[in-house]
Amino acid sequence: MTIPVEQLTDPAVRAFVRAVNAQDRAAFAAVLAPGATMSDDGSDRDLGQWAEKEIFGVGGHMDVETEQAGGRALVVRYRNDTWGEMRTAWRFVVGEDGKVNRFETGQA
């Protein structure tokens, strides 16, 4: 069972997932705060390079299974053309301006 994107609690996280699933680079950039950071499996990565390699260049897609922490912690069935499908955990830090300052992802 998945949670429809429109029903995700946090507006910034909802916009993030919508942008990923639509493969919309402009919408993805718009939801991120200037200087936003991220990590994958505990290692900080260059967000722009990572997004191109793991999302936009390979058809990344998020099917949200659960959300916690006011919608800022997700368990997702994530798939892309490189890795296939895997269960991943995502945590988001959202600023007062409603932009994602940081996200962390890794195996769930």
Image (cartoon, grey):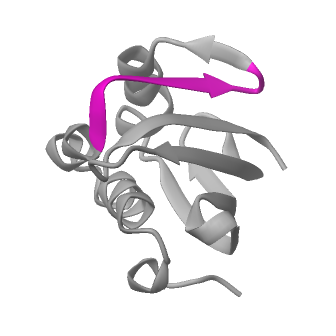
What kind of secondary structure does the magenta stretch mostly adopt? strand
Which residue does the image show at 65% across and 48% down from the upper left? 90
| In front of the other: 61 or 27 | 27
Q: Position of residue 38 (x, y in %)?
A: 54, 26
| In front of the other: 37 or 40 | 37
**Magenta residue check for 39:** yes
Q: Decide if residue 45 is in sight here.
A: yes
Left or right, 39 with respect to 4, comes to: right
Give the residue at the far right of this rendering.
108
| In front of the other: 63 or 82 | 63
Left or right, 90 with respect to 96, comes to: right
Q: Decide if residue 85 is in sight here.
A: no
Which residue does the image show at 32% across and 61% down from the upper left? 15
Examine the image and state in which quarter residue 29 appears.
Answer: top left
45 is higher (above) or lower (below) than 51? above
Q: Position of residue 19 (x, y in %)?
A: 30, 55
**Magenta residue check for 27:** no
**Range shown magenta:** 32-42
5 is higher (above) or lower (below) than 61? below
87 is higher (above) or lower (below) than 48? below
Give the residue at the far left of this rendering.
26
Q: Position of residue 28 (x, y in %)?
A: 27, 44
97 is higher (above) or lower (below) than 6? above
Q: Position of residue 96 (x, y in %)?
A: 34, 49
Quadrant that contains the N terminus = bottom right
Which residue does the image show at 59% across and 34% down from the upper left? 82
Which residue does the image show at 76% across and 27% down from the upper left? 41
